[in-house]
Image: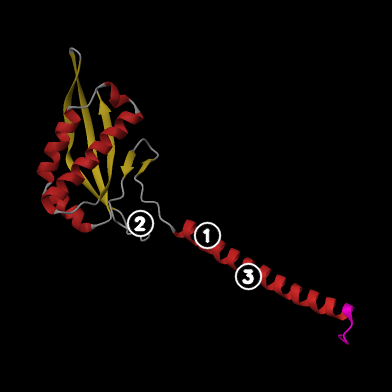
Amino acid sequence: MSNSNPSEEATDNSKGHSKKLLWVILGLLGLLLIGGGGAAAFFLLAGNNAPKVTQQGGGDSWVESTPEGQATAEKTPAIYYELTPTFMVKIANGKQSHYLQVDVSVMSRDQLVIDAVKLHKPLIVSELLAIFNAASYDSLFTIKGKRELQIKALDNINGMLRREEKISGVRAVLFTNFMVQ
C-alpha cells in the first residue's frame, strides 16, 4: 500500500493540470497575437492599384490611372505638359453643327514619359482630334460623358506610347478648358 495521503496526490494532480492549462492558454494567446498582427500589417501596408477617378475643384476634372506593375508606395512629384494649341472640333447634332473647344494637359510622374509625349505630340494630337470629333454632342454636357472622353484619351495616349516607345505612364488627362458652342 502506499504511504502517501490521497488528498496530497489530488493536489499535485490539480497543480500539474493547471500548469498544462496555463501553457495551452498562453500558446493560443500568442498565436492569436501573431495572427492579428500579421492581418493588421497586411491591411495597413497593402496598396490599392485600382485606377482612380477624381474631380478637382474649380471646374477642372481629371482622371488618374495607375500603370500595370508600378508601385504606388513612393510618390514622386507630378509633371504636367500642356498639349497646345487648343483643340477645336466640329460636333454634329442632327442637322445642327456645334463646336467643342478643349485645352488638354497630361500628367505623369516620370520625365521620360513626358519626353515621349513631346516627341510624339503630332501623333497624339491627331488621334485626340479624332476622339473628340467622334464624341456625342449630348454626352459632352454630363460629368460621366466628360470622364469617358478623358478615359478614352488616356487609354489612347498610353497605348500609342506602348506601341512607339514601349513605355506608358501618363497618369492623368486634364481638361483645363472645356467649352461647347
**Residue 112 location, x and y as percent?**
19, 58
**Residue assigned mark 3:** 27
**Residue 172 location, x and y as percent?**
28, 45
* Label ID, residue 100: none
Residue at the image point whose x is 19% and y is 44% from the top: 157
Name the front one of labels 3 and 2: 3
**Residue assigned mark 1:** 40
Q: Is residue 93 above or below residue 28?
A: above
What's the distance in space between the residues labelled 3 and 1, CA to CA? Answer: 20 Å
79 part of magenta stretch = no
> Disc 3 on helix, strand or loop?
helix
Q: Quadrant of the C terminus?
A: top left
> Disc 1 on helix, strand or loop?
helix
Residue at the image point whose x is 28% and y is 52% from the top: 68
Name the kind of residue labelled 3 in the image: Gly
**Residue 144 location, x and y as percent?**
34, 30
Name the kind of residue labelled 2 in the image: Thr
Magenta residues?
Answer: 1-7
Q: Earlier in the sequence, mark 3 or mark 2?
A: 3
Q: Are marks 2 and 1 in contact (CB under 8 Å)?
A: no
Give whichever of 95, 71 is nearer the camera: 71
Q: In terms of image quadrants, where is residue 153?
A: top left
Crowding at dot 3, Cα within 10 Å, few <14 / some 14-19 / many 20+, comes out as: few
Q: Is residue 15 above or below residue 102?
A: below
Name the kind of residue labelled 1 in the image: Ala
> Disc 2 on helix, strand or loop?
loop
* Label ID, residue 72: 2
